Amino acid sequence: MLATPETQRSAVMQQADSISMVVDLAALRKNYATLQKMIGPNIHIIPSIKGDGYGIGAAEAAGEFAAVGAYSVATGSIDDALAIRNSGNDMRIHMFPGALPGAMPLYYEHKLTPSIYNDEFAQAASAAAKSKWGVFIKVDAGFGRLGVPIDEAKDFILKTAALPNLFIEGVFTHLPFGGDEAGREWATQTTKRFDALLEDLEKAGLNIPITQCVASTGTLHGIQKQTRCNAVSVGHLLFGGLGREPLGAEKTSDLVPAITRVSARLIHIRRHKQAGTIGGGGKISVAAGTVTGTLPIGLHEGYRAAAAGKTSYVLVHGRRAPVYFVSQEYMAVDLTEVPNVKLGDEVCLFGKDQGEHISIEEVANWQGQAPLHIVMNMNKRFPIRFIDSAK
């Protein structure tokens, strides 16, 4: 799926609002193939497309994952789910927890797979269904956020399976950890408890088509190979890593970022004829001959100032230029070392420019944030241009 009419902005609009985000849809398919090799051909992949497809558009992301044969996609947003349906995509959509029981008729109408984790949801789903409706049971195996407690899960699942018009299509849990040894050991031991639950359900005569306990970090640490579960639900890795790998790994990883470039054009250039100060309160000194530039990107667009003791950079004509400061809707950059710069020149916040490259991970490091936060901060403001480098 390539650019939609909404993303095809006129030349006049590009002059009025020069910011841009470029998304390579081929990256999603490539990362999906890489992930399938990591986990093996017999494991189902359920791409998590939370946060409007990690900022690139839920419908566009789901279209690519449907094309490569994903079992389903997963989101907690009804807006994301309806956008997928309105795009003409009838693939399975697993709804993460996020709704109230009264939403079950809407879920059933649009063929969405709900997450069930208490009696209220189970009864509401059974009442809404007009024929057999597959549901996923969310188990809390130790994270403590959502789900039926694992010690109570067997009885709850068997009781839910006996309700009219429902069948247990999947049982899943979420075991996030930071990649450290203690976290990995916790996830490994908790996975064993989840596997034991699945074995007990099987002995009770319940055949569950989809079982899942591993997400991005668990996949990287090989936990999927230690469990009897037959599916993974992965988001970060499919969209390019987004911090699940160590800083620097993005330079060598087989995973490629879906967002390939974020940029804007210079709307003002000033050549300082004498030394002075700039910035709030005049706290930044500039020498005579300094060249500063202004971009129409600031806090409103999700870009944040550098953390204390760090400096952010942008790319202009393939050169790194320091960022002086960030305000609500603008940022000022140092163009002194960039030759032949002129009004309207493109400035790259992250991505490639004439052989130089700034990664999302670098920007996150400068700002003292996680790469996911960078994407989520910027995902609503930027007009997206979709490309497909494989075509």
Image (cartoon, rainbow, N blue to C red):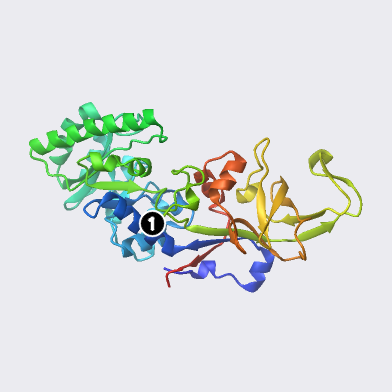
Instruction: Kindly state the secondary structure of the residue where label 1 is placed.
Output: helix
Q: Quadrant of residue 116?
A: top left
Number of dots carrying numbers:
1
- Image quarter where the C terminus lies is bottom left
Amino acid type of the residue tagged 1 in the rendering: Asn
Residue 330 visible (yes or no): no
Q: Is residue 330 left or right of residue 369?
A: right
Position of residue 383 relative to residue 10, above or below, is above
- Image quarter where the N terminus lies is bottom left
What residue appears at the point 68 percent right and 68 percent down from the top-left corner? 15
Task: Provide residue 38's location: percent of width, then percent of height.
Answer: 31, 51
Residue 270 visible (yes or no): yes
Position of residue 196 relative to residue 362, above or below, is above
Task: Provide residue 377's location: percent of width, then percent of height.
Answer: 55, 47
What residue appears at the point 24 percent right and 44 percent down from the top-left corner? 136
Label 1 crowd (10 A; few <14 / some 14-19 / many >=20): many
Q: Which residue is mark 1?
A: 31
Task: Provide residue 169's location: percent of width, then percent of height.
Answer: 20, 47
What residue appears at the point 30 percent right and 56 percent down from the top-left corner? 110
Position of residue 314 relative to residue 317, above or below, is above
Depth check, front residue: 390 or 95? 390
